[in-house]
Image: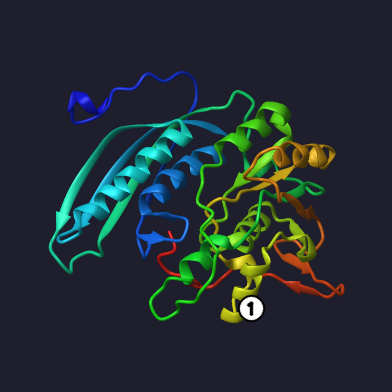
Amino acid sequence: YLDKRHDGAILEMNGSMAFTTDSFVISPVFFPGGDIGELAVNGTVNDLAMCGAVPQFISVSFIIEEGLPFRDLWKILTSIKYACEEAGVMVVTGDTKVVERDKGDKIFINTTGIGNLHKKANIDVSRVKSGDKVIVSDWVATHGVAILSVREGLQFETTIESDTRSLHRPVLSLLDHLGEHIHLLRDPTRGGIATVLNEVARDRNLGVDLNEMSLPVDDQVNAACEMLGLDPLYVANEGVFITIVDASIADQALEILHKDAYCRQAKIIGEMTENHPRQVVATGEIGGKRVVSMMIGEQLPRIC
């Protein structure tokens, strides 16, 4: 596609399509476990997967600040190449602009993705009902903590790495096996799990009973959150998704997820309920309950 040096790409598509776009301004552009290039591809692939689509094509556009070292650009381009190969998508069109020094911050990337809808996908928040189980696919809050560990003024020593990765394979496996029973898919990036669950509760006029003891949080991540005064429920993720499924197949969904290397820590963390509509209520270690409200403002700016 790129070899044709055309102003756009002519694509052959069959059936229903999913279409998404996202921009990436993360700081710093290189972080433990990844960089802005890998993040941009994975983020767009995951947005397509959350629609129940098989990712196929993406566009990549760069806004580069004058003075960005060529070795940094090459490293980012290499990451994009490898991330596309891992996700099985093709870059079919793109653009590059350069802005004056101090008019940008190294590099910003925009990606747009297109994919074919999975034949068994029926992902819609309107299908979420009372009694549905809430499943999270893996460790939470890892990405946000990894970024904070290298932020200027906040640096601290840790082995925590970002969880940036493409999630289409476990999602498509769920759809292959369980199809219509998968009611909703969301990736809890900015605002974390708390934001996703609050949005669903409000959209459906239902409540969410959340079991905090079931939330998979790595010990190092938990310790870092305590040190920084952060609640893991609100911290950004880049390699995790939430699925809300029919209760009858929840255990089967877990079995499928546990077979994937990126979903070994998948857990049922809650249930939709008609009690306390439009609220997420978390139960803690000793049975105490608290309302997990929608986050006001942005906890961690430029996290993706």
Place residue 80 in its image quadrant.
top left
Give 14 or 262, whichever is nearer the viewer: 262
Percent coordinates x, y for residue 40 in the rendering: 39, 48
- Please say whether residue 246 is visible from this viewpoint: no
Q: Is residue 156 above or below residue 130?
A: below
Instruction: Please tell me in which quadrant of the rendered image residue 121 appears.
Output: top right
Single out the residue that lies furthest toward the right: 287
Q: Position of residue 134 (x, y in %)?
A: 73, 50
Residue beneath the point at 55% across and 50% down: 239
Q: Position of residue 241 (x, y in %)?
A: 61, 49
The residue depicted at 18 percent of the width and 27 percent of the height is 6
Q: Position of residue 16 (x, y in %)?
A: 50, 25
Residue at 63% across, 32% down? 122
Quadrant of res 112: top left
Instruction: Give the quadrant of the C terminus.
Output: bottom left
2 horizontally vs 169: left or right: left
* Side of 159 where 154 appears, left or right: left
Q: Amino acid at mark 1?
A: Glu
Tell me the residue that label 1 is attached to: 226
Residue 130 at least partly seen: yes
Looking at the picture, tell me which residue is in the foreground, 263 or 249. 263
Q: Is residue 282 above or below residue 51?
A: below
Relative to 16, residue 155 above or below? below
Taking the view exactly as shown, the residue that stands out farthest to the left is 100
Image mark count: 1
Q: Label 1, secondary structure: give it.
A: helix
Estimate how packed mark 1 is, as few (under 14), some (14 to 19) or many (20 or more) residues with alpha carbons within 10 Å: few
| Residue at (67, 63) in percent of width and height | 218
